Amino acid sequence: MGDLFGHDWSSFPRLYAGHLGLSLSAIVVGLLISLPLGVLAARSAALARFALGSASIVQTIPGLALLALMVPLLGGRIGFWPAFVALTLYSVLPLLRNTIVGLRGVDPDVREAALAVGMTERQRLFQVDLPLAAPVIIAGLRTAAVWTVGAATLATPVGAESLGGLIFQGLQTRNWASVIAGCLGSAVLALGLDQLIALFEIGYQRQARRYVLAGLLGLAVLCLPVAGLFQGTPTSAAAAGTAGLPLAGRTVVLGAKTFTEQYVLADAMRRVLERAGARVEIKQDLGSNVAFDALLHNDVDLYVDYTGTVWTTIMHRDDVVPRDRMLGEIGTWLAANGGATEVAALGFENAYAFATSRATASRLGLRSIADLAGKSATLASDPEFLGRPDWVRTRDAYGLGSLQTRQMDSTFMYDAVATGSVDVITAYTTDGRIDAFDLILLTDEKSALPPYDAFVLASPKASKDAVLIAIIRDLASGIDNATMRHANAMVDLERRPVAEAGAWLFEHIKPPPT
Amino acid sequence: MLLEVSGLAKRFGDTPVVQDVSFALQAGETLALIGPSGCGKTTTLKMVNRLIEPDAGSIRLGGQGANEVPAAQWRRHIGYVIQSAGLFPHRSVFDNVAITPRLLGWDATRISVSVADLLDMVGLQPAQFAERMPRQLSGGQKQRVGLARALVGEPRLVLMDEPFAALDPVTKDVLIEDIRELRSRLGFAIVLVTHDFAEAVRLADRIAILDAGRIIQMDTPEKLIAAPATPEVAALLAAPRRSAELISALFKGATHG
Ligand SMILES: Nc1ncnc2c1ncn2[C@@H]1O[C@H](COP(=O)(O)OP(=O)(O)OP(=O)(O)O)[C@@H](O)[C@H]1O
Ligand SMILES: [Mg+2]
């Protein structure tokens, strides 16, 4: 699809196909569960109460949380399965409820007459109960279809492919065309399925084949974007002529979390590995803990994390040790806890830093974090930071109890502080917008904020692959702060595609000292 | 004997609803069950076609015990007509009537001939009504379809639970005459549940009076009127007697005047 609005659309067919497959299989399996359960529950008040109660509870769990919960529940698996299980559970409530309501709504005299004319219970179920309840059940199916397709956009952080990928990445890289494409694609799919089910229903009721044919045609139209998958992808071309390279014939799965730097790093690492002959798959937009779980379960071979993140959110340490000791302790801890390894520190740090605009700094007299003590300024931060011991420690060390905190998506924080709608933000030190918006970083004399050195983690399985590990080791100290910040700025400020920034970064990795 | 019911009993929870009910019917004979609301008429009727399983007692139809065949098969040979007709709203008139023959495994020609005959007999032109859906019928027409559906399987016994209760007096009168006519042509026996003594008199050979789940008197209408067994029976006959006397007096007055 070219590069409409400067975006690379080549992933659209794959994400659309993932979305369609995920939604359809969840709806179909949801129906296979709900119909028999609904039939039993319609005849037993106790079972109905239990089944509807459980389904309602599932429904009250926010979609994103339900999806994320499935990862640990399925033993750390990421990708299709946790998303499929969560969406199936999600589709059960409208289906089950409408099956029960529909069956209960069948006139008792008619049900009795069915037995009186000599039907067996089974014949009555199929010839009277289900046909008469069908309109209500189908209404439930339509609701389930719309909900499931909508919720499937949230499947991205657990590693399943869906149009949510366009939305999540678009939000992080401020590519609104990508966000809109993701939303539109999902909306068209939801409404399309809804209308198709309606067509099939009319076709069945009127016994008119043309409605069914129109429905099938519509289904084909909905599947059309998937066809883009089969137009020879660039990766298959890249696979040619890899014979003799160290990683020829091997597939490496790279993980990436949900922000620009992670997308760019994954793209650059893809180029490194492809140069060595590997076929590379990227699972991006993974939640922070999801990425680590996936690594432990070998669903992801490699991903980049940050020392401070692993230290606090995975190892649950709330002390701070000096930078040189932290990476070593992390390596030891990883070896003892699941067998992943720390392969190479990349050479740059993406720490949290308190940032403010020049105007605010002079108005409030800010140079160090200590200058915030006792002031009634507003601090905006991502939800992750405010939930971490980092914040508690910093607040207590500097006496920042008087600050008003606001959670905000990282995409919007920089604008907010630059325009003065908030006074201070917790910026990421490699974010290109610090320079671009001329922000000032407050100094941290008490070293309350831990170091956040970027390093590559390898899964237990990948750790045993000496050739792969050697190639990644060569990346050690290959990217400094300025280089990373520049690559991030290409996406966040210049609105260039991630692939372009990845290519630039790949060109600018410092070769290992020989 | 066509139908032999003996010692029938049913309780719902701790409440006995039917107690020691026995009666027998000859082929082609009609028995009416009359009694106050809640006395167990419907329950008794439904035990005969096993929509309700009795706690005790036995039912034999044409020498066969009710529990000797599966319930669904037992019901296919007993017609059942209820107040609301209970037609299948998603099936045409033809399909509604054809259900029992299909369950009995008749061939297609026999089914279409029988259904058309029956629709004709209950006064619904097949050409006009066969393809209609139940919602396109009046109350009386629905009741006639219900009657056709009950009779098409050639049952020797038809159970009717207040079949005329929802009909206006004129429609009801015509339908009663039609049923008498059908009965004499087809020869089925009827157990009729009703509140209306006049209705019972027009159709029944014998009337059983039920009270609190027991038959307190069972006899021909003449004998019931001549010798009510208990004050309850006498009370039950008092109202129809008053209206009959009043109406006949009015009719006499009209002819003499
Ligand atoms: N499924 C049931 N569970 C509990 N009690 C029932 C049930 N069906 C009927 N009963 C009770 O049994 C008694 C007899 O009911 P039945 O329907 O046989 O009365 P009926 O003589 O047909 O009354 P009506 O003239 O009002 O139709 C009533 O008191 C009724 O409440
Ligand atoms: Mg009754």
Image: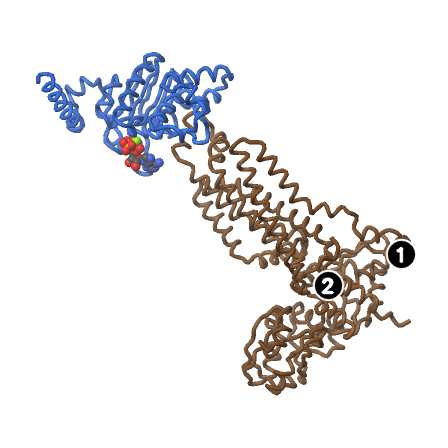
Whether B177 is drawn above or below B239: the answer is: above
Which chain can be seen in blue?
Answer: B
Side of B209 relative to A73 (left or right): left
| Kind of residue at disc 1 | Leu
Q: Secondary structure at mark 1?
A: loop
Which chain can be seen in brown?
Answer: A
Nearest-to-viewer mark from 2 and 1: 2
The residue most toward the left is B257
> Which chain does the residue under circle 2 lie in?
A
Circle 1 residues within 10 Å: few <14, some 14–19, many ≥20: few
Q: Which residue is mark 2?
A: A263
User: Quadrant of the rendered structure where residue A318 is?
Assistant: bottom right
| Kind of residue at disc 2 | Tyr
| Residue A352, disc | none
Q: Residue at x 80, y 71 (%)?
A: A479
Side of A377 relative to A451 (left or right): left
Q: CA distance from mark 2 to mark 1?
A: 25 Å
Q: Position of residue A469 (x, y in %)?
A: 82, 63
Q: Which residue is mark 1?
A: A245
Whether A344 is drawn above or below A138: the answer is: below
